[in-house]
Image (spheres, helix red, strand yellow):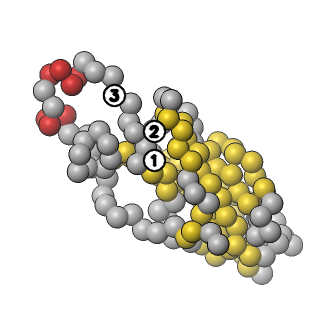
Amino acid sequence: MPTFASNPTSNSVAFDWLAFDWSFAIMDVIPTFDKIAMLRHFQLVEEGQFVGIFCYIVDIMTTLGSVYNFNPQTTPQVELYSPDGATLVSFTNMTNVSTGVYKYLHQTLLGQQKGIYTGRFKAINGTMTGLSEELALFKVTEQ
């Protein structure tokens, strides 16, 4: 059974440079993934329509108690699965919409299998790879 995406639990906050002294400025910091998530609501889509799939890259490790979106070193990718579990789209790059926010626009087809389509997100930052669990992304319904 797929996990349905939920709403965000906290607001994004910019990195707080005032929390650190000058020595922090000379260190190379690679953000650590807290999560790769789909924060928009599950969508119903009629066959033949486009559906926008968004993912958010979030870091909470650099400034304790704060979260912020960031762009990882490589473009995040999405993989889509049809209701029967077959791979519909292998990992493919998403488009950057704003800092830490990525979108993939998927065209459903007339006569396409009806039901819940799931997917996973993947992003790489330095030596760290983030891979989301499989999420229910949208449901294709009759036109």
Please name the residue that numbered disc 2 is placed on. Answer: 71
Give percent across and percent down for residue 9. 34, 64
Give percent across and percent down for residue 70. 40, 41
The kind of residue tagged 3 is: Val
Determine the secondary structure under disc 2. Answer: loop
Which of the 4 image quarters holds residue 141? bottom right
Q: Nearer the viewer, residue 12 or 36?
A: 36
> Looking at the image, which residue is at 83% across and 70% down?
112
Determine the secondary structure under disc 1. Answer: strand
Q: Quadrant of the C terminus?
A: bottom right
Q: Are marks 1 and 2 in contact (CB under 8 Å)?
A: yes
Please name the residue that numbered disc 3 is placed on. Answer: 29
Distance Cα–Cα, label 1 vs label 2:
7 Å
Which of the 4 image quarters holds residue 33? top left
Q: Earlier in the sequence, mark 1 or mark 3?
A: 3
Q: Nearer the viewer, residue 61 or 142?
A: 61
Rendered view: 77 above or below 46: above
Please name the residue that numbered disc 1 is placed on. Answer: 57
The kind of residue tagged 1 is: Ile
Give percent across and percent down for residue 102. 53, 48
Res 95 visible: no
Question: What number is the disc on residue 134?
Answer: none
> Looking at the image, which residue is at 57% across and 57% down?
133
